Image (cartoon, grey):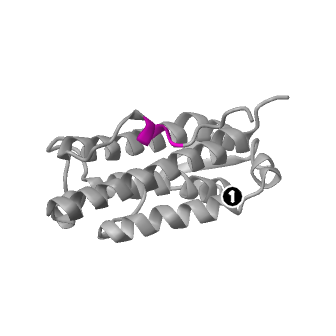
């Protein structure tokens, strides 16, 4: 059987979103037990020219649930500004998980050959949904999930590789 668009998108998004939820929980525990300010944590950057932790988590949600919404509507644009606090980021990830779990494989697989565009201002980059997911959405999704993980590790949150990988889809 061939791999489906649902398998490479929604299933992959859910695996990593659940891992992000887990590393956010560990970050909260670390901050609470260690007396670290969550407000400072959401503003932390790996480097001065990179966007903060808050943006990384917003982008994880945007490049998963937002990518599917864009595929359905035919247009995907960058995320808007957010002032979410740590709890708001956790809620955003939880909502993305719920929304993606509600999607059926047939619903997503039906989008595969449809046209869509990435729109930034007046500029539109044309895609078909499959290529948008594989060459734009998934790489961005993993970049931001990794950067969020790296920011927490850099701050001292006790995370390991398994915290990033999440629950793998092993043969049962």
Q: Position of residue 15 (x, y in %)?
A: 57, 45
- Which residue extends farthest top? 1
Observer-nearest of 136 and 150: 150
Residue 55 visible at all: yes
Q: Is residue 93 above or below residue 47?
A: below
Residue 122 visible at all: no
Q: Is residue 168 above or below residue 23?
A: above
Query: Going 48% across and 57% down the picture, which residue do you hit?
Result: 61
Q: Left of 14 or right of it: where is 6?
A: right
Location of the N terminus (image quadrant)? top right
Label 1 sits on a secondary structure element that is: helix
Q: Position of residue 105 (x, y in %)?
A: 78, 50
Q: Is residue 107 above or below residue 165?
A: below
Location of the C terminus (image quadrant)? top right
By secondary structure, the bulk of the magenta-drawn segment is best described as helix
Q: Left of 72 or right of it: where is 87?
A: left
Q: What segment is highlighted magenta in the picture?
A: 162-166
Residue 27 counted in the magenta span? no
Q: Which residue is mark 1?
A: 72
Q: Position of residue 93 (x, y in %)?
A: 47, 61
Dot 1, how many residues are within 10 Å of its Cα: few (below 14), some (14-19), or many (20+)? some
Query: Going 38% across and 64% down the picture, which residue do you hit?
Result: 89
Q: Position of residue 114 (x, y in %)?
A: 74, 46
Query: Going 30% across and 55% down the picture, which residue do you hit?
Result: 27
- Which residue extends farthest right? 1
Observer-nearest of 80 and 46: 46
């Amino acid at each position: 059987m061939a791999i489906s668009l649902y398998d490479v998108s929604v299933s992959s998004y859910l695996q990593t979103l659940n891992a992000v939820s887990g590393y956010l929980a560990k970050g909260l525990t670390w901050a609470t037990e260690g007396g670290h300010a969550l407000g400072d944590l959401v503003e932390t950057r790996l480097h001065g020219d990179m966007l903060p932790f808050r943006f990384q988590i917003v982008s994880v949600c945007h490049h998963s649930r937002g990518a599917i919404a864009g595929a359905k509507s035919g247009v995907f644009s960058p995320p808007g500004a957010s002032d979410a606090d740590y709890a708001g980021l956790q809620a955003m990830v939880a909502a993305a998980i719920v929304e993606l779990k509600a999607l059926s494989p047939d619903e997503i697989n039906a989008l595969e050959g449809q046209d869509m565009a990435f729109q930034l201002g007046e500029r539109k980059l044309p895609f078909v949904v499959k290529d948008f997911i594989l060459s734009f959405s998934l790489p961005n999704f993993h970049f931001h999930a990794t950067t969020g993980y790296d920011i927490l590790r850099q701050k001292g949150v006790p995370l390991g590789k398994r915290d990033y990988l999440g629950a793998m889809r092993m043969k049962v």
